[in-house]
Amino acid sequence: MSFILLTKAGKRTGFPYLLSRAFSQRSERSSRPSFGIAFDIDGVVLLGSSPVGGSPGALRKLYDADGRLKIPYVFLTNGGGFPEAKRAFELSQSLGINVSPYQVLQGHSPFKQLVKRFENELIVAVGKGEPAAVMSEYGFKYVLSIDEYASCFENIDPLAPYKTWKIKLAATQNANFNESIHKNDVFSKRVQAAFVVSDPVDWSRDIQVLCDILKTGGLPGRNVGPQPHIYFANDDLEYQTKFPSERLGMGAFRIALESIFNRIHSHSLEYTCFGKPHPSVFKNAEIVLQKLVRSLYDDFYDINDNDPPYFKRLYMIGDNPAVDIKGSRQTGHPWFSILTRTGVFKGKENHDKFPADLVVDTVEEAVDYILAKESAS
């Protein structure tokens, strides 16, 4: 599996131009770094929406006195549910820095590479936040959230009468719902793919509806048909929130769906998972960091020069040994893994199965280590 999140663009357009606007001015030629940093979000820089581990101060050390970015970095998270621009704005507000959307690589960001395959097909987006809006922004033309899709089928959720919460429907989740897809089309068009964009909220309904879609060939209530595609933005079993112990993640939902589907269908569930720890995620982050360096230091590079900026080291700062550390170590050079104790990992020593290159208490300690090491090298 491989993907590239950003397309080629000419000078002053696309990626370089937007980043130059985001960071106002390019850094001086003499300060060009030969390293970059990838930060996990949940459990490393934030717990819920609150900063953790001195993250605001740590991130500010990557900017100069005038607020211009001087050290290239990205946020590399398996989380998501919102468009990258919205997540960048929220990070900027929470951390007190200026984050560009192009610095935010979410678990579902690779889905945009599937646009050509499903652009004109009916698809269903699952998860908290704004899953349909995410997929629409990526370029999928006929997408419904699972809330919207389920609302078209009377009695599809047998437990609905016992649920006291209300579901936000089309008007608030997907502005194109009424314009792009007629309700009658839902009963005649087969769902070609389901995308689990973020952690599902209503597991019982979502498992029921997805099983209906997957075992009937995309038309719930009909006869059994070929299984449509299903994609998961990540396969994290657990993740850290403000609650003291870890919470079940998308990987747990995938296990539940797969177990049930395999019991009620003659064929095993076929699915594709993206996100960390797949090495392709880290390789893509390196490509994005290279583009970031070009945008900030483009006086170093001829626009026709195809040789990317060279990184001696890339640092992955994460809290989950089985995801952040495993992925960066599997990817190999030039990645260097740093494990913090503010999230999933809380051990006194290094992790036994997936040991990091360095273990620290907080992200601020990690950044201080990186800056000291790089200034001395």
Image (spheres, helix red, strand yellow):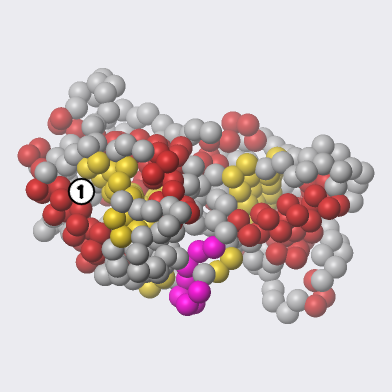
Residue assigned mark 1: 71
Can you say whether 334 is above or below 52 in the image? above
Does dot 1 land on a helix, a strand or a loop?
loop
In the image, 287 versus 125, the foreground residue is 287
Q: Quadrant of residue 57?
A: bottom left
Is residue 124 found left or right of 28 in the rendered image? Answer: right
Can you say whether 326 is above or below 128 in the image? above
At x 59%, y 31%, the residue is: 116
Residue type indicated by callout 1: Ile
Residue 259 sits inside the magenta stretch: no
Does residue 294 show up? yes
Q: Position of residue 278 (x, y in %)?
A: 49, 42
In the image, 268 versus 124, the foreground residue is 268
At x 50%, y 64%, the residue is: 239
Q: Give the range drawn in magenta.
A: 238-245
**Quarter of the image with the C terminus in it:** top left
Residue 242 sits inside the magenta stretch: yes
Is residue 46 found left or right of 201 in the rendered image? Answer: left
Q: Which residue reaches farthest right?
A: 223
Q: Where is residue 36 in the image (x, y as percent from the top left)?
A: 26, 45
Does residue 142 show up? no
Is residue 287 found left or right of 34 in the rendered image? Answer: right
At x 55%, y 56%, the residue is: 236
